[in-house]
Image (spheres, grey):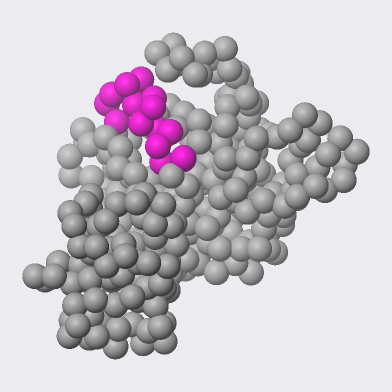
């Protein structure tokens, strides 16, 4: 199948859509094992938990699940993300696509991902745009290069191998992708820490226009954040689409969210539980806490 992508008309602007792998593009059963100094497993982390986990003295990570292509092949493509990619392609994008994952051993993952993008989307995913941050060869390559001198203070004195996953992702976005001429970069990730990291070092790469996209297919994280915020109201900037996701995943209308939407249109409010309601007022969708309908930040 020929690629549906075209080269940019404006050679001064090169855009790319870069996707995290685990729980953003594909959901699998893979976990990061935490081992103690004797090699015994003390806990297992989801990809999201791994992003922020700090090893205790004597602990180490075991990534064996993420080197298992069988686990990856049995994974399910996240419907929410698939819809995003389908929409991008349907609009006749001139952008390239890439993968930015904390997994190791690119040789195991790249052939599968290239076939996946070609088969599902008709996209030619280039091997050079697949970045496995924990691949030993990639680590050696990055260790052989000096970090940019104008990085924030938190990076000083560190080598690539000592950087956290969010810091590694930020560095690759600014350094490796910019080096390939990309200056319009959209990153899709299920970790806010990963998305925020590039903002910290953006001053070091001022030529890069950066668009972060938080992938939260069921609104699980956003809803928890709203509950914890104490704010009375949160406007839904995506309106009806976000309302349907909330009704499908957090209301008694899970089997028929369209019926929930009709109920919302008739009554103006549908309870989501734990003191949160979905409301529709003057054609605008929002979340409210404890029935309060005051003003608040959008999102």
Q: Is residue 194 magenta?
A: yes
In terms of depth relative to the viewer, which is nearer, 2 or 143? 143
Task: Classify 291 as above or below 68.
Answer: below
* Residue stretch in magenta: 193-208
Most common SS among magenta residues: helix
Provide residue 34's location: percent of width, then percent of height.
75, 44
Q: Is residue 46 left or right of residue 190?
A: right
Q: Quadrant of residue 159?
A: top right
- Tell me if residue 118 can be seen: no
Front position in the image: 129 or 297 = 297
Q: Relative to the observer, which residue lies in front, 208 or 110?
A: 208
Percent across and percent down for residue 188 are 40, 50
Q: Give the left or right position of residue 234, taking residue 256 as reference.
A: left
Coordinates of residue 64 in the picture (x, y in percent): 75, 50
Asked if residue 160 is among those painted magenta in the image, a careful observer would answer no
The residue positioned farthest toward the right in the image shown: 38
Q: Where, by quadrant of the figure, is residue 35 drawn? A: top right
Q: Residue at x 49, y 44 (%)?
A: 100
Residue at figure coordinates x 23%, y 71% from the top left: 279
Residue drawn at x 51%, y 19% as measured from the top left: 155
On screen, 33 above or below 216?
above
Q: Please indicate whether residue 278 sits to the left or right of residue 103 in the image.
A: left
Vertical arrangement, residue 277 with respect to residue 88, above or below: below
Q: Position of residue 75 (x, y in %)?
A: 60, 67
Image quarter where the N terminus lies is: bottom left
Q: Report how many numbered discs are placed on residues in the image.
A: 0
> Can residue 212 be seen here?
yes
Relative vertical location of residue 257 with respect to residue 143 in this rendering, above or below: below
Which residue is painted at 18% across and 72% down in the image?
280
């Amino acid at each position: 199948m020929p690629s549906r992508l075209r080269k940019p008309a404006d050679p001064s602007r090169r855009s790319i859509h870069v996707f995290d792998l685990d729980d953003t593009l594909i959901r699998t059963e893979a976990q990061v094992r935490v081992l103690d100094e004797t090699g015994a497993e003390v806990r297992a982390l989801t990809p999201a938990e791994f992003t922020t986990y700090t090893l205790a003295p004597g602990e180490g990570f075991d990534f064996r699940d993420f080197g298992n292509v069988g686990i990856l092949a049995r994974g399910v493509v996240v419907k929410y993300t698939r819809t995003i990619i389908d929409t991008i392609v349907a609009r006749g994008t001139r952008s390239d696509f890439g993968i930015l994952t904390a997994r190791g051993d690119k040789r195991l993952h790249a052939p599968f991902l290239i076939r996946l993008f070609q088969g599902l989307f008709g996209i030619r995913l280039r091997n050079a745009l697949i970045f496995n941050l924990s691949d030993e060869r990639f680590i050696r390559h990055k260790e052989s290069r000096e970090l940019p001198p104008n990085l924030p203070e938190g990076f000083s004195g560190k080598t690539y191998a000592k950087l956290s996953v969010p810091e590694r992702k930020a560095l690759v976005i600014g350094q490796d992708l910019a080096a390939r001429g990309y200056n319009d970069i959209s990153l899709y990730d299920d970790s806010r820490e990963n998305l925020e990291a590039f903002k910290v070092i953006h001053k070091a790469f001022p030529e890069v226009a950066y668009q972060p996209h938080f992938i939260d297919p069921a609104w699980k994280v956003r809803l928890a954040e709203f509950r914890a915020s104490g704010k009375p109201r949160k406007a839904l900037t995506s309106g009806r689409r976000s309302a349907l996701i909330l009704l499908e995943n957090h209301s008694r209308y899970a089997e028929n969210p369209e019926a929930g939407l009709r109920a919302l249109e008739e009554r103006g409010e549908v309870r989501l539980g734990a003191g949160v309601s979905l409301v529709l007022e003057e054609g605008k969708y929002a979340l409210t806490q404890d029935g309060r309908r005051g003003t608040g930040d959008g999102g």
